[in-house]
């Protein structure tokens, strides 16, 4: 059978080895605890489900939606951006509904780049930035984020020729996998750098609502003056409102860039189910009681996992946002080896940092999308097996 050359360029799935060992452990009857999955375990809030049920019964929602999304959803997004970030976006031209933000993050490449073009992607980073470029025939060029800088971008480390040649740059704060957040200065530098090098700036903001401290509320790139000249921000209700399975997200910002993405979408998909968009409106209007409750739960879990990691001597930065710990392997041990050891000896899954790029070597990622009792049990298993942050 013939298959496309572009598929040959997709990097090998780095978690295949872990998946195999996991299947083996489950088959052997072991109770596997996964700190590997970045998917909220808590249910979608009831009001969102109630809206879906009601709107699913309305036959007006049963036909093809519009590719750019219902105006009512885009208006709710604009209102949310105004309330949450103090940012004005025009719902008609500066907001696009997505079938989950991953869809837009991959498809934007088809609207902006051609074979031979390059795009700048952070290392470590969410793998879709790189694969999206590859599927469009373009070349991802990695720029490093480092532990020493707390994973804030250091634009002086990006060669000017690479920046001049590239079409766009990806940034992602709060960051997966490192949980790093940035202040307005870093975002201002990003906008200035991209303007200087004639780059489009694409910001993935999926985790702005998963924060733990009202003094460190994550920012939107669109809060930077003049950002809209060059920037588009990808957002999603997946992590904000425990809606990963619902597939609803949005892109906001530069109208010309959004038009390119919209043209791809009209030809590839027919938009998100309208009942889901109605439910999305409810999710965007959830009160501080619901979202604050979710944050409290995550904060308690974070504190518990952080307490264990500290006691065990691991090196990490305490997350201010996201549900990830990004941790140094003991003695700089190889990431894949370390994760294999933890799975084989403890039936606990942690993710090798190298799954997010070469700069992830020497690190592993742990998620706390599990009840506290399971977090404690997993950490106790590591302790008992003598796995600590020391050599
Ligand atoms: C989870 C996640 C997304 C959001 O994915 P959806 O397609 O909206 O569910 C985007 N970016 C990053 C970095 C993520 O971790």
Image: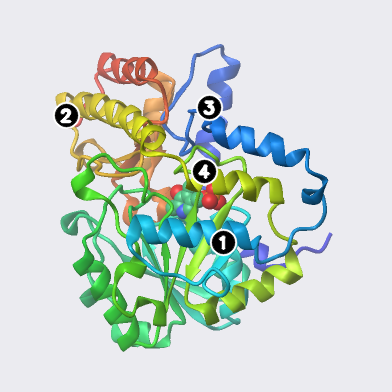
Residue underneath mark 1: 74
Q: Nearer the viewer, residue 80 or 354?
A: 80
Q: Position of residue 189 (x, y in %)?
A: 24, 75
- Which numbered tag is attached to residue 283? 4
* Image marks 2 and 3: residues in contact by CB distance under 8 Å: no
SS under mark 3: helix
Give the CA separation, mark 2 to mark 3.
27 Å
SS under mark 1: helix
Mark 1 vs 4, N-terminal side:
1
Mark 2 vs 4, N-terminal side:
4
Dot 4 beta carbon under 8 Å from ligand 1? no
Q: Position of residue 159 (x, y in %)?
A: 29, 81
Mark 2 vs 1, N-terminal side:
1
Q: What residue sits 55% from the left and 83% below the top? A: 116
Residue underneath mark 2: 310
Give the CA separation, mark 2 to mark 1.
44 Å
Q: What residue sits 41% from the left and 33% below the top? A: 290
- 360 vs 390: above or below: below
Mark 1 vs 3, N-terminal side:
3
Residue underneath mark 3: 22
Dot 2 beta carbon under 8 Å from ligand 1? no
Give the CA separation, mark 1 to mark 3.
41 Å
Query: Left or right: 292 with respect to 69?
Result: left
- 172 vs 306: above or below: below
Give the CA separation, mark 3 to mark 4.
35 Å
Mark 2 vs 3, N-terminal side:
3
- Which numbered tag is attached to residue 198? none
- Image quadrant for the C terminus? top left
Q: Position of residue 128 (x, y in %)?
A: 52, 58
Query: Left or right: 168 with respect to 49?
Result: left
């Amino acid at each position: 059978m013939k298959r496309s050359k572009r598929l040959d360029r997709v990097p090998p799935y780095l978690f295949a080895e872990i998946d195999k060992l996991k299947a083996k452990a489950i088959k052997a009857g072991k109770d596997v605890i996964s700190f590997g999955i970045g998917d909220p375990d808590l249910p979608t809030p009831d009001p969102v489900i109630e809206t879906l049920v009601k709107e699913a019964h309305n036959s007006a929602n049963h036909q093809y939606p519009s590719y750019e999304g219902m105006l009512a959803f885009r208006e709710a997004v604009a209102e949310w951006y105004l309330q949450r970030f103090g940012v004005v976006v025009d719902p008609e031209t500066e907001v696009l509904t997505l079938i989950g933000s991953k869809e837009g993050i991959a498809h934007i490449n088809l609207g902006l780049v051609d074979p031979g073009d390059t795009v700048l992607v952070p290392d470590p980073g969410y793998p879709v930035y790189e694969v999206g470029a590859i599927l469009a025939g373009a070349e991802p060029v990695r720029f490093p984020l480092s532990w020493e800088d707390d994973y804030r971008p250091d634009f002086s480390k990006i060669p000017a020729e690479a920046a001049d040649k590239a079409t766009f740059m990806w940034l992602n704060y709060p960051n997966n996998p490192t949980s790093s957040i940035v202040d307005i200065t870093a975002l201002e530098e990003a906008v200035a750098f991209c303007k200087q090098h004639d780059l489009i700036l694409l910001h993935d903001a999926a985790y702005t609502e998963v924060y733990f401290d009202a003094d460190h509320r994550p920012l939107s790139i669109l809060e930077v003056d003049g950002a809209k000249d060059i920037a588009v921000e990808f957002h999603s209700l997946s992590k904000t409102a425990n809606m990963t399975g619902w597939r609803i997200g949005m892109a906001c910002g530069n109208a010309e860039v959004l038009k390119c993405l919209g043209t791809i979408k009209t030809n590839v998909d027919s938009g998100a189910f309208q009942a889901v968009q109605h439910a999305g409106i409810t999710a965007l209007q959830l009160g501080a009681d619901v979202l604050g409750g979710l944050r409290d739960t995550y904060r308690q879990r974070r504190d518990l996992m952080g307490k264990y990691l500290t006691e065990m001597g691991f090196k990490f930065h305490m997350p201010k946002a996201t549900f990830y710990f990004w941790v140094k392997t003991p003695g700089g041990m190889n990431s894949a080896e370390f994760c294999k050891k933890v799975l084989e000896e403890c039936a606990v899954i942690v993710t090798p940092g190298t799954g997010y790029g070469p700069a992830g070597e020497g690190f592993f990622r742990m998620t706390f999308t599990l009840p506290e009792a399971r977090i404690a049990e997993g950490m106790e298993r590591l302790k008992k097996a003598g796995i600590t942050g020391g050599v």
